[in-house]
């Protein structure tokens, strides 16, 4: 397994935290459920875990990258559906979990331990599909990841990524007893403060104060455009809509989406977007905005649970 060095203290810190989370075996560190044995069943399972964003994309004979995909099924399923697959993650333990599972199934994968912002070990134009779920939140500079992915994507390739919804993210842990009071403004690039950094899943509780960053929707879309990609899908959703006690994450996620997911494509070599429209070369200029007055931080009221 080639080794690469973390690019900065954020990556080094989050790597330590993910080692800790993986050691405790929280859900994000263990592939959930079991895909059926048949090819059609595997494809259905794959389309479910990728939220239908890659439905209809043929994988046989393709080259796939599962980015920050440690602890999930997607790399294994890419490979079992016929794609030559590379799994990238920063956590040794996250990679090892998938490696053990892949070995037990006789599934071949390439593994690379690196920061998602440094894909220099991968060649330009090497991948037809890049799937990248729920992890941009762990880096301050999402644009750098998007630019790296645009480089390793082949012409005509597709990139699907998701992260915490940048609006909803500001509200977690901000319940005052009568309402939510955001922890910072949407317009500020500081990390979102995590006040109670205990990850809680049932009886498992892990103290893992990861550094986390919201990324504005416009910044994500414009980073794709700046990297020469075009966006052809954007989804906002919550894992479930059952709600929960006042002030809980579940209650918040009933009203606001937990995640944002974007599908971007690299134009085919003809330079056209593939949907008949001409490729844009520059992102639109951002509208001017006045910084709203700052918020004073609310007092923490609950344990983080997600
Ligand atoms: C929420 S988990 C998502 C795991 C998997 N993709 C899934 O959907 O279940 C976040 C993953 O990002 C990885 N990660 C965090 N920071 C990273 C970084 N800077 N570079 C690469 N991977 C990183 C963690 O090790 C972890 O495996």
Image (cartoon, rainbow, N blue to C red):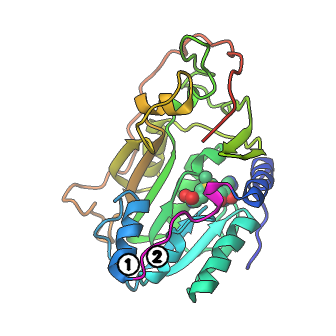
Q: Which mark is residue 150?
A: none
Look at the image and say whether residue 70 sits in the magenta stretch: no
In x, y percent, where is residue 147?
A: 53, 56
The residue lying at 76 percent from left, 47 percent from top is 10
How many marks the image carries: the answer is 2
Q: Which residues are magenta?
A: 26-37
Q: Using the image, determine if residue 74 lies above or below residue 110.
A: above
Relative to the observer, which residue lies in front, 72 or 305?
305
Task: Indicate which quadrant contains ligand 1.
Answer: bottom right
Q: In this rendering, does residue 250 appear at all?
A: yes
Where does residue 289 sit, x and y in percent of width and height? 47, 19
Mark 1 residue element: loop
The reply to whether the magenta stretch includes residue 29 is yes
Q: Is residue 18 left or right of residue 169?
A: right
Ligand 1 within 8 A of label 2's CB? no
Q: Earlier in the sequence, mark 2 or mark 1?
A: 1
Residue 117 appears in view: no
- Give the number of the disc on residue 78: 2
Taking the view exactly as shown, the residue that stands out farthest to the front is 203
Q: In the rendered view, would you say 263 is above or below 235?
A: below
Q: Could you classify mark 2 by the number of other residues whose Cα lies within 10 Å: few (under 14), some (14-19), or many (20 or more)? A: many
Q: Quadrant of the C terminus?
A: top right
Reading the image, the residue beneath label 1 is 59
Report the residue at 73% width, 63% height from top.
91
Cβ atoms at labels 2 and 1 below 8 Å apart: yes
Left or right of 240? Residue 90 is right
């Amino acid at each position: 397994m080639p080794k690469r060095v973390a690019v900065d203290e954020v990556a080094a810190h989050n790597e330590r935290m993910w080692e800790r989370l993986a050691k405790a075996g929280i859900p994000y560190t263990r592939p959930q459920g079991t895909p059926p044995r048949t090819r059609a069943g595997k494809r259905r399972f794959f389309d479910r875990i990728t939220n239908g964003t890659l439905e209809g994309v043929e994988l046989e004979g393709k080259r796939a990258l599962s980015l920050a995909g440690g602890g999930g099924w997607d790399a294994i399923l890419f490979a079992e559906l016929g794609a030559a697959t590379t799994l990238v993650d920063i956590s040794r333990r996250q990679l090892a979990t998938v490696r053990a599972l892949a070995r037990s199934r006789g599934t071949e994968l390439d593994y690379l331990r690196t920061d998602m912002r440094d894909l220099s070990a991968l060649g330009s134009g090497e991948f037809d599909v890049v799937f990248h779920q729920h992890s941009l939140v762990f880096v301050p500079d999402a644009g750098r990841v998007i630019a790296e992915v645009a480089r390793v994507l082949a012409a005509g390739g597709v990139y699907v990524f998701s992260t915490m919804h940048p609006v909803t993210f500001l509200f977690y842990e901000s319940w005052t007893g009568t309402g939510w009071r955001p922890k910072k403004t949407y317009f500020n690039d500081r990390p979102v403060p995590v006040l109670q950094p205990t990850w809680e899943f049932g009886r498992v509780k892990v103290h893992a104060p990861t550094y986390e960053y919201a990324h504005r929707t416009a910044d994500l879309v414009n980073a794709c455009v700046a990297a020469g990609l075009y966006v052809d899908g954007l989804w906002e959703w919550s894992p479930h809509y059952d709600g929960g006690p006042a002030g809980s994450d579940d209650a918040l996620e009933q009203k606001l989406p937990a995640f944002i997911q974007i599908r971007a494509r690299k134009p085919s070599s003809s330079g056209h977007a593939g949907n008949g429209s001409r490729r844009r070369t520059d992102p639109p200029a951002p509208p001017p905005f006045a910084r709203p007055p700052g918020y004073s931080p609310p007092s923490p009221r609950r344990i983080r649970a997600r």
